[in-house]
Image (spheres, helix red, strand yellow):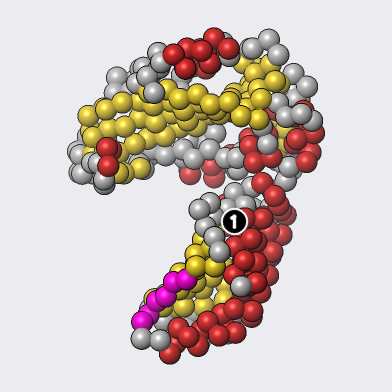
Amino acid sequence: MNPNASKNRELIKQYPFVSDILSARMEPHNGQGGTSVNDLTIRVEKADGDLMFRRADNVGLGDSSGIFQFKGNRKDQVMRRGEYLFAIDGKGKIVNRVNWPRNDEEKRKTGEIYGWSALWTGRVTFANNKEVYSNPIWDKVRYLVWVTVEAWHADTKNDDVPGGRFGEFKDRLIHITIYSAPDQGFEKLREESSAYSNLVLDSRLMTRGVIEKDHDIVSIGGMLYEMCITFQDEVYFNGMKDVLDTGPFRGASGQFGMVKVLCAEMCGYDRVMLEDNSSYVTFQLRPGSKHMYVLGQQGTLPQIRNLVRTVVRM
């Protein structure tokens, strides 16, 4: 949407702090390192537990990664993305800003940072080098504002030229979601939310959590494995594997309500993916093994649990 569209002007008038946010320096910039905005969208929602455990999905900040498009209006273009979270007080002032790790290298140093960190303004480091957040400001915060900045470039299709795949600058887009305080307030919302209900799980998060011995992630990993064993015993070894082994094809698919099931054999490995519009989980069986394992997933624990339960009950 045009930044000067009437809807945007009305929302900026209602929420003046949006102008301050747009004036802030946020990567990625335009082709000249500036902060011009070619497209602006603003939404207003109420904060929920998922926001408390949301993480930034930064791409191409300080490294050569990018998001490529091969069809549609963005065909032959590549994009960098940066995400930010601002805390706004009752007077409409920015009282905190979360600068997420720009890339995987920085994330290895900082660890995972979640949306709830915007409700604290300080950190304390103990003798064992463990950091904890301090100086809570949840009683002052009236809004949390999530900002996604995208910068699109022509795809050079050549990694060996200056700038790599990022060629001529095309445009810079900003998407803003204003989250108003929930009825119970931000302090109570933080207490009620948890990694077991609201954290989106992916393979990198799970691997890093195990390496760092994160208690919650290790526990969640155990829960995912139990779901895998339930699927294995109730579905896979209870008829599905026989159908696949005796069928004429190396793969199959089926629909169980809102859940789609995809099965395939790859280099001797049997793989089954359960997915819906918002999540997926993949189980795999090694050649000669009698036990499946979790190969990958994307979604919260309740979402993944629903995938498995839906298929098991059918």
Give how far across and how far down residue 294 sits, in percent: 56, 68
Residue denoted by label 1:
206
State the image quarter where residue 246 is shown. Answer: bottom left
Q: Quadrant of the C terminus?
A: bottom right
Q: What predominant SS class does the magenta segment belong to?
A: strand
Image mark count: 1
Left or right: 171 as drawn, with respect to 18: left
Q: Which residue is pictured at 49% across the width and 40% down the height?
A: 57
Nearest to the observer: residue 190 or residue 4 = 4
Magenta residues (range): 249-254
* Residue type, numbered disc 1: Met
Residue 253 part of the magenta-drawn span: yes
Location of residue 85 in the rendering, given as x and y in whole percent from the top left corner: 57, 28
The relative height of residue 161 versus residue 277 in the rendered view (above or below) is: above
* Residue at 57% in and 76% down: 292
- Find numbered disc 1 in the image and state the secondary structure of the residue it sits on: helix
